[in-house]
Image: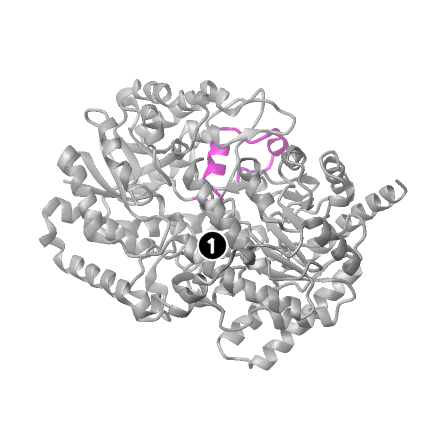
C-alpha cells in the first residue's frame, strides 16, 4: 500500500496556546512545570489530529518551544560558553539563546536569527567555536517526545535537522575562524549516538532534514553528503531507517550527492514537479520515494486529481510499496485549521485548506492510489467542484486593474533626479544633523491598544471614540520622541494590527481570517492576509493618521508603508497568477498612497521591504535575476511618484546582501536601514566594495530581545560601522520596529542610542 505522511505540524495550537504559555512563563506568571505540561498537551493534541485524519506516518520532535534548530544546538551541547557559564536552568539557557537574558546579574544577548530558506519563519543560527566540542544531551528531546507519543499509543517518526544542513546553516562565533562544515567529523558521532538511542526507544524510521541540498553548495559541502550517510548506513539495524528529506526546491543540480543507501528520499513536487523523473532515476535499488504533493507553504486546496496523477507516475516506476504520499514540507508554515474561520465568505473558504485539512488531503491521495479513485469518489468530486469554482469566479479578475497595468511606462520606475541632487534638496528641507536618529516604525503595542482595537472590531465603541483613542496614542508617542530627542519621528502605528494585514484589509483583492495564525519566530505569530483576486486601493490607507502626526510634531515625521514585495511574500499569494503580476498591482496601489502622503505634508516616507531577500530564488541563475528585476521594478514603481525633496527610506531585516547587492543598490532608496546588531560588522564591507553612495542605517541594537544595551555598547557598534561607512552616510536606529517590546526597556534603549549618536555628532563636529 501507499502510505501517507506529514513532515511537520504547526506548534502554536488552535488558539495560539503555545504563544500564551511561553509569554506567561517569561513574565513569571506561569511555572516551568506548567509550561512543559501545556507543551505536552499540545503535542498530544496535534498527534491525534493527524491520526484521526488517517495519516500513516506522523512526525514527532517537530515541536519546539522557540525553534527546532535551537533545540538541536542544546541537544548537541553546542551552546556558546557565554550561555553555559552561568549555570542557568536548561530551559532558561535555551530561551537566553533565543531571546537574550538580562536578569539576576546575567546579561547575554540572543544568538543571531535568520530566515529559514525563503520562508517567513526564522531559525536560530548554530554559532560555533574553533575548539568546538559536541556532546549529546543525556535526555535528548527527540527520544523524550517519541516515548511520549508511544505512551499515548501513537507511533511517530522523529524529525532531526541533518548534520550537513545543521553545520552549513551555522556560522563561526565572533572572533572565531572555523568553517562549520569542517566540524562534521566531530558532530557525526553525536548523530550516531542519537540515532542509536532513538532505535532503542522503538523508532523504526527517522526523518533527517537536509534541505540545504536544494542550494548551490560549495564543493566541500556537497562532497560530504554521500560519505556522511554511508557512515550512518553502516550502523545497520542499530539505528532507525533514514528518510532523507529535502524541500523548498529541486535537487537535480546536486543529484550526484544524493545518498542511495537510505530507506527513503523526500522531494518537494509542489515547488518543482519536473524533478520527479530525475530523482526516481537516482534512487537506490530499494529506496522509497516520499512524494511531496500537498503544499506545506500555502493555503489553497490541493488539486487532488493532479496530485494523484503525479503519485501514480511514481508508482508505475517504483511500485506501491516504494512510494509515500507526503506534504511538500512541514506544515509549520500554514495555519492550524480552517474550522476556526467562522466569518469567511463561504465561497472563498471553499478554496482553502489549512494544516488539519491538508492532513486529510494527504490521506485521501494515498487511499486513492492504493485502493483506486472509487474508494474516495465523494472527496474527489467535492474537490473538483471547489477547484472549478475558484477558477471561474468573478472575484479573481478586475478589468480596471489589468487596464492600469497595461499603461505603465518606463518613466514611472524612476525618480525625477539622481541621488546627489535629491539629497541636497532633502538636507535643505529637512535640516537633519550628522548621525541622525530615528526608529524603524512601530512603538510598543500595549494591552490597552489591543483592547481598544478589539472593542472597535466588535462594535463596542464607535469609530469616533476609537479615532480619538488613536490620536491620544499618537500624541503620547510624539511627546516621548520629543523627550528622547530623536531627529526623525514616527507616529508609532497604534492603529495597525500587523504590517501586512493592516494594508491588506484596506485593499481590494484580499481575504482575511480571524484565527489563521502562523509562527514567525519564537512566540511571534502573524495572520497573513490571502490574495484571492486582482489588487487595487479603493481609498487612502495611512494618510489620516500620518497627517495628524505631522500637525503635532516639531521635527520631520516619517510615513510608514509596507512595500509591494513584503506585502506579497507575507501574504498567502495566489497560485494561479505569477507573483510578478501581483507585485505590480500592489506597487500601483502603494504609489497612490506615497503620493497622497507627500500631498499631506509627509516628506520622509519609509517603504519597508524586509521580505525582498526572502523571496530570492534559492539558486543563482535566470530565475533569480528575473525575480530581482520585477521585484526592484515593483519597489521603484511604488516610490517614484514623489518630488526630489521627499526622502524615501526602506528597511531590511535578516538580510545577507552579498549575493544580490546590485539589486539593493538598484532600489535607489535615499536611506536604507538594515538589521545588523547580531551580524558581524564586516557585513557592511559590501557597501564599501560597491561604493554605495546613499545613506545607511545599520541597526545598533536587537529589538527581538527585552535586553537593554548600554550606551557604551552602542558606541562600540557605531565605531565598528565607521570603519566601513562615511559619517555623512550613517543613520543611527534600532534593528527593527518596537511593536513587541515594553515601554520601559524601549525608552531606556533609545535613550542610550540617542546619547551614543550625540557623542559621535560632537566628536565629528570638530573634524
Residue shown at 30%/62% (left/top)? 351
Disc 1: which residue:
570
Q: Is residue 81 magenta?
A: yes
Question: On screen, 37 above or below 213?
Answer: below
Q: Secondary structure at mark 1?
A: loop
Which residue is more in the foreground, 108 or 154? 108
> Quadrant of the rendered structure where residue 548 is?
bottom right
**Up-down relation of residue 592 to residue 109 (above or below):** below
Q: Position of residue 557 (x, y in %)?
A: 71, 63
Picture coordinates of residue 51, whole percent (x, y): 25, 49
In this rendered view, identify the residue nearer to me: 731 or 687. 687
Tell me where the magenta segment starts and ends, as one range.
Answer: 64-93
Left or right for 561, reference 535: right
Label 1 crowd bin: few (<14), some (14–19), many (20+), radius 10 Å: many
| Count of numbered marks | 1
* Snapshot colouring: one colour
Q: Is residue 665 above or below residue 340?
A: above
Amino acid at each position: 500500500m501507499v502510505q501517507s505522511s506529514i513532515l511537520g505540524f504547526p506548534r502554536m495550537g488552535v488558539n495560539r496556546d503555545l504563544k500564551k504559555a511561553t509569554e506567561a512563563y517569561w513574565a513569571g506568571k506561569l511555572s516551568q512545570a506548567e509550561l512543559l505540561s501545556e507543551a505536552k498537551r499540545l503535542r498530544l493534541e496535534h498527534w491525534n489530529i493527524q491520526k484521526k485524519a488517517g495519516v500513516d506516518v506522523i512526525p514527532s520532535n517537530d515541536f519546539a518551544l522557540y525553534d527546532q534548530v535551537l533545540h538541536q544546538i542544546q541537544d548537541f551541547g553546542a551552546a556558546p560558553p557565554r550561555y553555559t557559564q552561568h549555570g542557568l536552568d536548561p530551559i532558561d539557557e535555551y530561551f537566553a539563546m533565543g531571546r537574550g537574558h538580562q536578569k539576576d546579574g546575567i546579561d547575554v544577548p540572543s544568538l543571531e536569527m535568520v530566515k529559514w530558506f525563503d520562508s517567513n519563519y526564522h531559525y536560530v543560527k548554530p554559532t560555533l567555536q574553533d575548539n568546538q566540542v559536541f556532546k549529546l544531551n543525556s535526555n535528548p528531546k527527540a527520544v523524550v517526545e517519541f516515548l511520549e507519543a508511544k505512551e499515548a499509543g501513537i507511533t511517530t517518526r522523529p524529525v532531526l535537522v541533518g548534520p550537513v544542513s545543521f553545520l552549513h546553516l551555522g556560522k563561526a562565533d565572533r572572533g572565531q575562524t572555523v568553517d562549520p562544515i569542517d566540524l562534521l567529523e566531530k558532530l557525526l558521532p553525536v548523530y550516531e549516538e542519537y540515532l542509536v538511542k532513538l532505535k532503542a526507544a522503538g523508532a523504526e524510521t527517522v526523518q533527517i532534514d537536509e534541505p540545504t541540498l536544494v542550494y548551490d553548495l560549495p564543493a566541500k559541502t556537497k562532497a560530504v553528503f554521500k560519505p556522511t550517510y554511508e557512515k550512518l548506513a553502516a550502523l545497520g539495524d542499530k539505528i532507525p531507517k533514514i528518510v532523507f528529506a529535502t524541500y523548498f526546491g529541486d535537487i537535480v543540480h546536486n543529484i550526484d550527492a544524493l545518498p542511495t543507501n537510505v530507506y527513503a528520499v523526500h522531494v518537494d513536487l509542489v515547488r518543482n514537479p519536473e524533478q520527479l523523473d530525475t530523482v526516481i532515476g537516482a534512487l537506490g535499488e530499494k529506496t522509497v520515494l516520499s512524494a511531496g504533493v500537498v503544499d506545506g507553504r500555502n493555503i489553497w486546496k490541493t488539486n487532488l486529481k493532479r496530485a494523484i496523477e503525479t503519485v501514480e507516475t511514481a508508482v508505475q516506476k517504483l511500485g506501491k510499496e516504494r512510494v509515500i504520499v507526503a506534504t511538500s514540507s512541514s506544515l509549520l508554515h500554514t495555519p492550524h485549521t480552517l474550522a476556526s474561520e467562522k466569518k469567511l465568505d463561504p465561497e472563498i473558504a471553499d478554496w482553502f485548506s489549512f494544516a488539519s485539512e491538508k492532513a486529510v488531503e494527504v490521506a485521501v491521495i494515498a487511499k486513492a492510489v492504493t485502493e483506486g479513485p472509487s474508494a474516495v469518489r465523494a472527496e474527489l468530486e467535492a474537490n473538483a467542484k471547489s477547484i472549478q469554482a475558484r477558477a471561474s469566479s468573478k472575484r479573481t479578475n478586475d478589468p480596471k486593474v489589468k487596464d492600469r497595468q497595461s499603461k505603465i511606462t518606463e518613466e514611472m520606475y524612476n525618480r525625477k533626479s539622481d541621488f546627489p541632487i535629491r539629497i541636497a534638496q532633502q538636507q535643505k528641507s529637512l535640516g537633519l544633523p550628522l548621525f541622525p536618529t530615528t526608529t524603524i516604525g512601530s512603538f510598543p503595542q500595549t494591552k490597552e491598544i489591543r483592547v481598544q482595537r478589539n472593542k472597535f472590531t466588535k462594535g463596542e465603541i464607535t469609530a469616533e471614540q476609537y479615532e480619538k483613542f488613536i490620536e491620544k496614542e499618537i500624541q503620547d508617542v510624539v511627546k516621548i520622541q520629543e523627550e528622547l530627542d530623536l531627529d526623525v519621528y514616527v507616529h508609532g502605528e497604534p492603529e495597525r494590527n500587523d504590517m501586512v494585514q493592516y494594508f491588506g484589509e484596506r485593499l481590494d483583492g484580499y481575504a482575511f481570517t480571524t484565527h489563521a495564525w502562523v509562527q514567525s519566530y519564537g512566540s511571534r505569530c502573524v495572520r497573513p492576509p490571502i490574495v484571492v483576486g486582482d489588487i487595487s486601493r479603493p481609498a487612502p490607507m495611512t494618510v489620516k493618521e500620518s497627517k495628524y502626526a505631522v500637525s503635532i510634531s516639531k521635527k520631520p515625521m516619517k510615513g510608514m508603508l509596507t512595500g509591494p514585495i513584503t506585502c506579497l511574500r507575507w501574504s498567502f499569494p495566489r497560485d494561479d497568477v505569477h507573483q510578478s503580476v501581483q507585485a505590480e498591482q500592489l506597487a500601483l496601489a502603494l504609489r497612490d498612497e506615497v503620493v497622497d502622503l507627500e500631498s499631506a505634508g509627509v516628506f520622509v516616507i519609509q517603504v519597508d521591504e524586509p521580505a525582498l531577500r526572502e523571496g530570492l530564488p534559492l539558486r543563482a541563475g535566470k530565475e533569480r535575476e528575473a525575480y530581482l528585476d520585477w521585484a526592484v521594478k515593483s519597489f521603484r514603481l511604488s516610490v517614484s511618484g514623489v518630488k526630489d525633496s521627499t526622502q524615501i527610506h526602506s528597511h531590511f531585516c535578516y538580510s545577507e546582501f552579498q549575493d544580490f547587492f546590485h539589486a539593493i543598490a538598484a532600489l535607489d532608496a535615499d536611506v536604507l536601514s538594515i538589521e545588523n546588531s547580531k551580524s558581524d560588522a564586516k557585513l557592511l564591507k559590501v557597501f564599501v566594495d560597491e561604493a554605495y553612495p546613499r545613506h545607511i542605517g545599520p541597526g545598533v541594537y536587537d529589538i527581538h530581545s527585552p535586553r537593554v544595551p548600554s550606551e557604551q555598547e552602542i558606541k562600540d557598534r557605531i565605531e565598528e560601522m565607521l570603519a566601513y561607512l562615511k559619517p555623512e552616510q550613517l543613520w543611527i536606529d534600532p534593528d527593527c520596529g518596537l511593536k513587541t517590546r515594553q515601554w520601559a526597556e524601549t525608552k531606556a534603549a533609545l535613550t542610550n542610542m540617542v546619547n551614543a549618536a550625540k557623542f559621535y555628532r560632537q566628536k565629528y563636529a570638530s573634524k
